[in-house]
Image (tube, grey):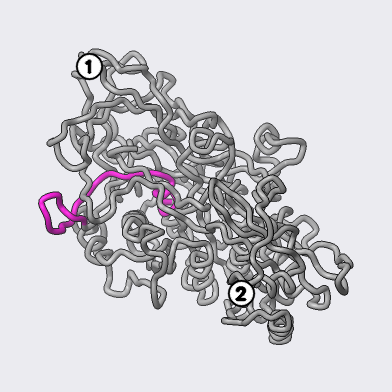
Amino acid sequence: MRSKRAKVRAGASLAATLPLLAGALALGTPAAHADGPARDVLKGTKPTWATTKADKGATSNGSGVSARVYLAGRDAAGLTAYAKAVSDPDSASYGKYLSAKQAQARFGATTAQVKAVKSWLTSAGLKVTGVTKHYVTVTGDVAAAEKAFGTQLHNYTKSGKTYRAPVATASVPAGLNGAVLTVTGLDNAPHKATHDDQLPPPDTVFRNAGPFSSYYGSNVASTLPNAYGSKIPYAVKGYTGQQLRAAYGAGTRTGKGVRVAITDAYASPTIAFDAATYAKKHGDAAWRSDQLRQVLPNKYVHTDECGASGWYGEETLDVEAVHAVAPAANVTYVGAASCYDDDLLDSLGKIVDGHLADIVSNSWGSIESAETTDVAAAYDQVFQFGAVEGIGFYFSSGDNGDEVANTGTKQVDTPANSAWVTGVGGTSLAVGKGDKYLWETGWGTLKATLSADGKSWTGFPGAFTSGAGGGTSATVSQPSYQKGVVPDALAKANGATAMRTVPDISAIADPNTGFLVGQTQTLPEGGQAYSEYRIGGTSLAAPVVAAVQALAQEARGGKAIGFANPAIYARYGSPAYHDVTDNPTGSGLAVARVDFVNGYDATDGLATSVRTLGKDSSLQAVRGYDDVTGVGSPAKGYVDSYRR
């Protein structure tokens, strides 16, 4: 099951000879089946959890199946090759983007391909219920699905529940000549992004308790115990746009003329009011009447299952963070009909099909072990279409460090693991007096509470609570842009083969040095009102980096940066980045926090704790590239480096 990127609030806790994505799902060698002519295997369509041990027998032939048959297009290899060339600063094709219409004409499925796919599906007894530029949807019974895809469907146990899945990898008739990319829906385990974040929904107000620092170190907790041998400051109340713009070298750039899109599920009913109120209160430029728009589905589904209201705060954070850093950029929010992968893919597809933006911020994802290859292939195709159009996708890297504490297995998150997206890691940011950038550490938090007598921190430095996601993929091969930059110790952490390492770049994420956000919420005493609170997570880092990219695109004369990773790595080791390390002061770093136990007032008491900086599970931010912060965070020279 996919897991929505956890935001951490302050109150608790994408025929090239060397294609970038060597691990892309592809058709297998045609194989003769006992019951008919040769077929092409759709690799990855049998999930890893469908094991012999978990097999509970055949699914009833009459059971219903709903599936998506994704179309490979007329030149899948050409799409990959062009996406690479157009994104590579050293290529003669760099920046020679296609329009959405041109991309479809050159790489999209032909009318004949669609007709052939539909004919095959209906001949098997399935009903075609829809056709888009990307896929054909079908419904039918198990018997028809088994006939169409050349495999039996059985029931399997997974995490204590029973789900349907193919007994063998699905296949399609070789006579379709590679028209099918993959199929999803043969297994019916949840493929969705669910809420596991700790952001309060609109029906519960959340407030931060003080004391606070207005900038890093402005308010020292003189009455609290020492940490690392000295007094520590209280956590900041929450940085605002002015402080973040200064930290990441915005200068006079505002993102004017640049289009940024944000994807999430559902849509906040108060976003326009909240964004306008926040900008006014914190000195950001007022929103123009046409500057913020929403592209929403005709109807929403799975609202209870997905916890629809809990997604409102994600949209609010993303919109306000982008505007705070790039106040003149145009922002389009594209809401998915649900938290399911199918619907999130549709929202990304809308952006590519209509070229709604050049930069896309995405603050959601899941653990790599929960990703299935069929779904990954569908995502990567969208990302590649985006690349040839000059669209870059930015995904947060996760909030559970190496994921061991969360899942018991060291792994990275997805879609940040895709070789066709920019994975955004997280830092703890210190902005000092006069909005001066002081330093950053990798984001990783250990928490210890104040002892009963108030004289010490119990078990200091405490237990791991959260940290930026990162590490080495077990499924995606190393892309060419990481070669020579990512150390072999990381790239080959899982064996002799170099693999994709996450993240690529980073920005503020630690909720203890977080961002102040404003959202309409329900008050404990009744009624609704606008309220502000501090927030963090790589859900913050992704829109901040997307906004910085908008500033860079403006500096480039408005020319789209597109899929940015080759350009990001080309700047590695230059003054364009802060080279983030875990202990920049050499003495250990921590902040003190006082929180309302109930999350909104002192009725149930206060909880005082110490939160360390730069302690990200087994991941470490070191000099050079690392698996917490990638190449580093944008420095003063980053934005203008795109002028060259």
- Residue 177 image label: none
**Res. 12 in view:** yes
Q: Residues within 10 Å of mark 2 (few under 14, many from 20)?
A: many
Q: Secondary structure at mark 1?
A: loop
User: Which quadrant: the C terminus?
Assistant: bottom right
Task: Determine whether, in the image, residue 107 is placed left or right of residue 387.
Answer: right
- Depth check, front residue: 205 or 568: 205
Seen in the picture, residue 430 relative to 19 is either above or below; the reply is above
Counting from the top left corner in percent of width and height, residue 279 is at: 24, 58
- Depth check, front residue: 393 or 37: 37
**Which residue is the site of mark 1?**
452
Q: Provide the residue span drawn in magenta.
A: 521-544
Task: Determine whether, in the image, residue 68 is placed left or right of residue 251.
Answer: right
Seen in the picture, residue 292 relative to 284 is either above or below; the reply is below
Callout 2 amino acid: His
**Which residue is the site of mark 2?**
134
**Res. 566 in view:** no
Task: Determine whether, in the image, residue 303 is placed left or right of residue 239.
Answer: right
Q: Secondary structure at mark 2?
A: loop
Counting from the top left corner in percent of width and height, residue 331 is at: 38, 66
